[in-house]
Amino acid sequence: MQRRAAILFLSFLPAAWLIHAAPAPAREKPGTDFTMRVMTYNIHSCKGMDGKIRPDRIAEVIRAFQPDIVALQEVRVGRVDPKTVDKPGSEGPTAEVPPVGEAPLPPPTLIDKRDPADTTGVDIPFTNQPGAIARAAGMGYVFYPLVRSGTEDYGIALLSKHPLHLVRAANLPTKPGRWFSEKRGAIWAEVTMEGGKTVQVVATHLGLSGKEREEQVSALLGPDWTADAKFHVPFI
């Protein structure tokens, strides 16, 4: 069974790839060849070297690359305090588990969206980072919160300038007890390109330990993800 895939690994800098998808016989829907630009970007909570939270600067970088699809890591919605970004355990004792943080998580469509009215009493501006970035870049988006505290949500997002249909969003295995341990998950969406061609896209943010990564990649290769009958080539 032949499959065509691009596996992208990145830590902090944005990067974009031009990918040419040609027809393949394995579980692929009919269509013509096409070229797309795919970008992955760890946005570091939109915190710049000047210590300011600026989603507009992230959107400016994305617009410069002109991607069809963008996978974002370290994304926040709520009242983001730049002083607590990067501090382990900064979500505090009010972090919820479940529905956000422990498997199984419901899909993003069933997770209550963060409301500015729910985070009053904190003298920090409310920001929907994935929403603001997507609007400024002229894209749609799906945000998947992996940690929810009293003032903000933290997770990953997938942006697309083409119609985006969410197939699955769920947790991945995480090793507890390490100082750098962090909840991990993935988003699987189907993107419909011009001409009706569909592309399967899975976006994630792997853990820092080798053992965690092995378990997370094994999960992504399993029946809940890329071995699912709904998953077909071309995919990214």
Image (spheres, helix red, strand yellow):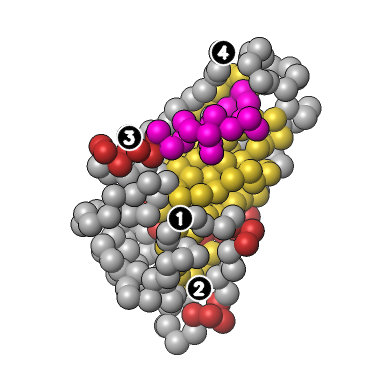
| Res 178 quadrant in image | bottom left
The Cα–Cα distance between marks 4 and 2, rounded to whole angstroms, is 48 Å
Relative vertical location of residue 222 with respect to residue 32 in this rendering, above or below: below
In this rendering, which labeled residue sits more in front, label 1 or label 3? 1
In this rendering, which labeled residue sits more in front, label 2 or label 3? 3
The Cα–Cα distance between marks 2 and 3, rounded to whole angstroms, is 36 Å
Please state which amino acid type lies under the numbered disc 2.
Phe
In this rendering, which labeled residue sits more in front, label 1 or label 2? 1
In this rendering, which labeled residue sits more in front, label 4 or label 2? 4
Task: Name the residue that disc number 4 marks.
Answer: 1
Task: Name the residue that disc number 1 marks.
Answer: 103
Assign the N terminus to one quadrant of the image. top right
Q: Residues within 10 Å of mark 4 (few under 14, many from 20)?
A: few
Res 127 visible: yes
Please state which amino acid type lies under the numbered disc 1.
Ala
Tell me which label, 1 or 4, sits earlier in the chain. Answer: 4
Tell me which label, 4 or 2, sits earlier in the chain. Answer: 4
Q: Main secondary structure of the magenta part?
A: loop
Please give the label number shown on residue 214: 3
Task: Name the residue that disc number 2 marks.
Answer: 126
Q: In terms of depth relative to the viewer, which is nearer, 17 or 170? A: 170
